Amino acid sequence: MKKSYIIFLALLLIIAANTQGTAQKLITKTGNIKFQASMPSYEEVAAENKSVSAVLDQTTGDFASLVLIKGFRFKVALMEEHFNENYMESEKFPKATFKGKIEDFDSSKITSSPKNFTLKGDLTIHGKTRPVSVIVKISKVSNGLNAAGAFEAKPEDFDIEIPSLVRKKIADKIKINYNFLLIK
């Protein structure tokens, strides 16, 4: 009887600790990432993924996100197929991740007007990890925070090979926009 009571008490403490820690975390499973790699005079090379997961720890400023590569949607189905099979090799590298920290983050100072913060961390795409530093605009919304921004990435920085046949049709720097509505 005493042993089961101790186990029960330990479980309650674990649940309480997890609940308390979760209260400071904001999450989304419907984050949005768009990328644009078009060149003038050629067919548009752009895609969007509306099911990106992200989490922000409000007490520490720790931020992480995960995107499934096959979740990107193109206007042209054949382009989507080539993106997954030939460039991103999404069977071998099914996801891209980011793990980092928002510098000098203080959730009590966030208002409905967007405020710029520096987000530093490691971005992993195509199995290759690179350090990044980007500006993220954070604003308060009714049920959480909105985090949005943009940055550029070069395919070669992540060992993504672009065949010479189509090289001039794809931008050297890919423009990436993100938007996360993070809620409790």
Image: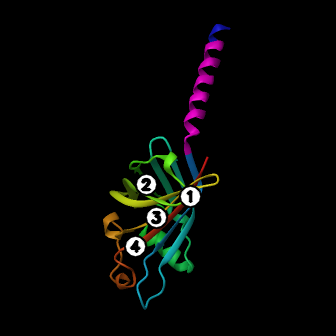
Q: Tell me if residue 13 comes above or below residue 89 in the rendering.
A: above
Sequence-wise first label, 1 or 4: 1
Q: Position of residue 37 (x, y in %)?
A: 42, 77
Q: Residue furthest bottom?
A: 41
The dot on residue 3 is: none
Residue annotated with mark 1: 112
Q: Which secondary structure dominates the residues rendered in magenta?
A: helix
Amino acid type, mark 2: Phe
Amino acid type, mark 3: Gly
Q: Tell me if residue 28 comes above or below residue 172 in the rendering.
A: above
Q: CA distance from mark 2 to mark 1?
A: 25 Å
Disc 1 or disc 4, which is closer to the eye? 1
Residue annotated with mark 3: 149
Q: Position of residue 4 (x, y in %)?
A: 65, 13
Residue annotated with mark 2: 98
Sequence-wise first label, 4 or 3: 3
Residue annotated with mark 4: 174
Residue at point 68%, 8% (across, down): 1
- Disc 2 secondary structure class: strand
Q: CA distance from mark 1 to mark 3?
A: 16 Å
